[in-house]
Image (spheres, grey):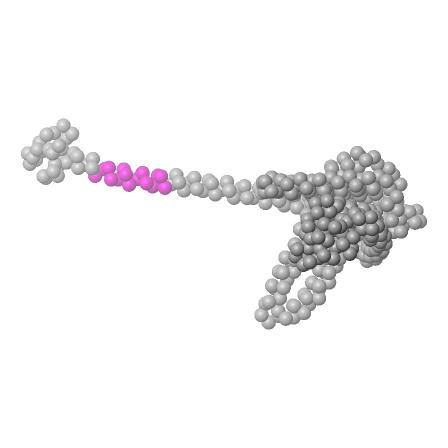
């Protein structure tokens, strides 16, 4: 991937183009496919969890992977459309499948960086507890820590997480994506925050319009349905009739004769299930437009931000840091292996020395016994090995 993007044509990556995503039939189809696949995997996971928690955990991971792949596939389709290119349905799924690990890698890097920042701030404030100079250090460290933490948090919230996915969808590696996010966060943070705020405002307005339209339509459809005697809430009101007397008033709202009588109407309960499914489907359809608008908007913001920017220097520095970290890790591993080998040699030498020391007393203890076997028990004069009587005192050798 080139580290220098060409300057955009005027209006090519304008933020108002974000709403054009709803006219991209490939993105709509991919969203529907991802939604259905995620729902099926979720229902299957719930069933598996009831029988085997361990296997259910694997299905939870699989469901998350399917959802993430579907999200990436939608993003790839919208990214290619923003770049005035086209991508096939299957190609988008394959690219999303083989690049999902990069999304996870960037997410892990961002979380690890935030944890390291918190640990660093913790150490700084522990240093500020030094008696005497502690309050002076705290007076300086507190505002600096607030500025650094706030800037990094804003960078992660407005640059790191929203723009990491578009950078990967463009075809960048994990290292190239990290370099782009780092340079954007350092040099263009305020501009990206303004664009992201505009995108969120646009998504909020579209969400209000879409759900206002769907809510009004749902109310009209429910009223006409009740007028024809089809009562989705009849079963529910009939069930509650015995609890609070709600069934007595059900007929006034067209909820069915059985509901009014306080009975349990299975036909109305079936309509209640269909009513719930229909509302869930309406809610999912209502989310599609804001979702596609947000994803397309992040792609446009990313392309507008990186246009004409050279990332080669940042990539080179980051690559050097990674190489240094690998070299230091390898050196640490070699030092640990050397220390382990020396410890083993020292232990072996100590064992051998202990064995040699233990053998010396044995020879010393055996010498008096041997001497006692060749001396007279009475006069302690030397005797030959084959002597039965002492030549000095005549005493008989003991067996």
Residue placed most toward the observer, 79 or 247: 247
In the depicted structure, whether residue 192 falls above or below residue 339: below
Query: Quadrant where the C terminus lies?
Result: top left
Residue, x 14% and y 28% (percent of image)? 386
The mark total stands at 0
> Quadrant location of residue 69?
top right
- Whether residue 24 appears in this view of the structure is yes
* Observer able to see residue 102: no
In the image, residue 26 above or below residue 197: above
Quadrant where the N terminus sits is top right
Magenta highlight on residue 243:
no
Query: Magenta segment, which residues?
Result: 354-368
Q: Main secondary structure of the magenta part?
A: helix
Q: Position of residue 73 (x, y in %)?
A: 78, 40
Q: Is residue 356 magenta?
A: yes
Rendered residue at 27%/37% (across/down): 363
Between residue 32 and residue 291, name the one nearer to us.
32
| Front position in the image: 163 or 347 | 163
């Amino acid at each position: 991937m080139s580290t220098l993007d060409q300057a955009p044509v005027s209006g090519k990556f304008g933020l108002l183009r974000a709403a054009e995503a709803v006219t991209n039939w490939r993105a709509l189809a991919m969203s529907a496919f991802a939604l259905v696949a995620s729902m099926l995997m979720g229902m299957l996971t719930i069933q598996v969890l009831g029988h085997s928690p361990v296997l259910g955990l694997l299905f939870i991971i699989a469901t998350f992977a399917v959802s993430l792949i579907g999200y990436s596939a939608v993003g790839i389709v919208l990214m290619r459309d923003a770049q005035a290119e086209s991508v096939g349905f299957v190609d988008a799924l394959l690219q999303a499948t083989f690049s999902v690990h990069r999304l996870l890698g960037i997410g892990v890097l961002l979380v690890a960086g935030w944890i390291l920042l918190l640990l660093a701030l913790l150490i700084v404030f522990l240093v500020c507890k030094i008696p005497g100079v502690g309050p002076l250090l705290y007076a300086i460290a507190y505002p600096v820590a607030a500025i650094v933490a706030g800037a990094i948090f804003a960078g992660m919230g407005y640059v790191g997480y929203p723009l990491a996915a578009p950078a990967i969808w463009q075809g960048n590696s994990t290292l190239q994506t990290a370099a782009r996010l780092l340079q954007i966060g350092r040099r263009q943070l305020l501009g990206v925050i303004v664009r992201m705020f505009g995108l969120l405002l646009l998504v909020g307005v579209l969400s209000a319009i879409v759900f206002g339209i769907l809510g009004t339509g749902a109310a009209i459809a429910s009223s006409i349905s009740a007028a024809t005697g089809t009562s989705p809430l009849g079963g529910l009101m009939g069930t509650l009739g015995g609890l609070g007397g709600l069934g007595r008033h059900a007929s006034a709202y067209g909820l069915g004769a059985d509901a009014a009588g306080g009975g349990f109407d299975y036909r109305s309960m079936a309509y209640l299930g269909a009513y719930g499914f229909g509302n869930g489907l309406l809610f999912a359809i209502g989310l599609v437009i804001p979702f596609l608008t947000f994803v397309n908007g992040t792609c446009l913001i990313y392309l507008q931000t990186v246009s004409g920017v050279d990332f080669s220097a940042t990539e080179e520095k980051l690559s050097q840091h990674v190489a240094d970290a690998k070299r230091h890790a390898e050196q640490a591993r070699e030092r640990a292996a050397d220390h382990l080998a020396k410890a083993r040699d020292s232990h072996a030498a100590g064992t051998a020395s202990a064995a040699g020391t233990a053998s010396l007393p044995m020879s010393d203890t055996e010498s008096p016994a041997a001497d006692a076997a060749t001396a007279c028990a009475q006069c302690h004069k030397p005797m030959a090995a084959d002597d039965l009587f002492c030549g000095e005192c005549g005493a008989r050798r003991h067996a």
